[in-house]
Image (cartoon, helix red, strand yellow):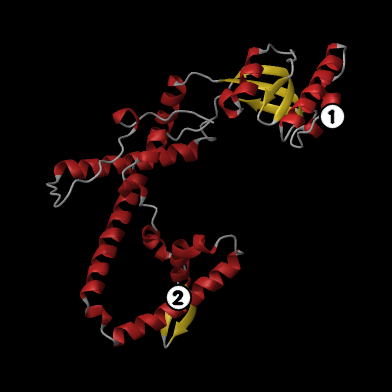
Amino acid sequence: MRFIPRHLLALPLTACLIASPLAAVTALAQENKVVARVDGAEITEADVELAMKDFGQALGAMPEEQKREAVTRLLIDTKLIARAAEKDAVQESEDFKRTMGYLRDKALMDTYLTAKGDEAVTEDEIKKVYEETVKSTKPEQEVRARHILFRAEDEAGMAEAEKKAKDVAQKLKEGGDFEALAKELSEDPGSKENGGDLGYFTKETMVPEFAETAFKLDKGQVSDPIKTQFGWHVIKVEDKRDQPVPSIDQVRDQIVVYLQRKSQQDTIEGLRKDAKIERIGGPVAPEAPAEGGKPAAPAPAN
């Protein structure tokens, strides 16, 4: 069950950018252990941490220590190149000044919105969002089912898979054990060893033909063979239930994200409302509105 509301995926671009590495400036209170010097200029552990937030993801699945080494080398090169740029008076150029102005505004924005988001997160607000969401949410039905699958790659394969499915359906009608037959015959590697057990699932998580059949069956019933894009299936429903409501601790992180993003969005909209903003030039495409035209309550989903 997911508590993050869908409208947060369509927040204004400004709010979506607050996770920028510049927001990590406040982390500079970390241990200032010196890891390198470049002509006497120090590079500290805090500098490495900041650069890791900036470049770490670009280094992919590289082991952590190798990432830190690569980032440290990058910082050393940055110091060398920056010093060379200063000797050429690059800092006096209009391009440099414009870039520094942008980066200053960006750092101020990141720090300000991060603080606003953090201020909005309290235990009372977390509890309030949780209780309101649970109260307004209709439990979704889940089915626990087993299946026996016969795969097919083409039409000829489909005909053969259908014959196999009909044969196993007949064996089940004659008293065959579904779990044992699944272990023996099913061609679904993900569930075969578990006797075809797919666990609990909601309707939208399965392909339509499979879901329609599974949700129509009663507990203990076995379907006739059905065809999907994967081949031919025989399904047995083991149980039906309403989707359990997660505990507040299970969705705490999602609620925190919701409260932070909502506070940041409200802050941006308030500032825009109070400001005199003039756009010069051609028309600008409007931002996508939140679902329903306003922030939605967190809605559970899979």
State the mark number for residue 185.
1
| Residue type pointed to by label 1 | Leu
Residue 188 lies, in percent from the top left, at 75, 34
Q: Secondary structure at mark 2?
A: helix
Q: Nearer the viewer, mark 2 or mark 1?
A: 1
Q: Nearer the viewer, residue 5 or 37?
A: 5
Residue drawn where x is 30% and y is 41% of the image: 265
Q: From the viewer's perspective, is residue 13 above or below residue 232? A: below
Residue 122 coordinates in the image, percent (x, y) = 39, 39
Q: Answer whether residue 244 is visible to the viewer in this image.
A: no
Secondary element at image label 1: helix
Q: Residue at x 74, y 15 (%)?
A: 224
Inter-mark Cα distance, 2 to 1: 59 Å
> Earlier along the polypeptide chain: callout 2 or callout 1?
2
**Quadrant of the image occupied by residue 127:** top left
Q: Position of residue 104 (x, y in %)?
A: 27, 64
Q: How many marks?
A: 2
Rate crowding at label 1 as few (under 14), some (14 to 19) or many (20 or more) other CA atoms within 10 Å: some
Q: In this orientation, which residue lies closer to the viewer: 26 or 187? A: 187
Q: Residue at x 15, y 52 (%)?
A: 281
> Which image quarter: residue 175?
top right
Residue in the image at 87% along x and 30% along y: 184
Asked if 150 appears above or below 167 in the picture, the reply is below
Q: Nearer the viewer, residue 203 or 81?
A: 203
Residue 106, given in percent of the width and then of the height, sits at 29, 59
Residue pointed to by mark 2? 75
The amino acid beneath tag 2 is Leu
Viewer can see residue 187: yes
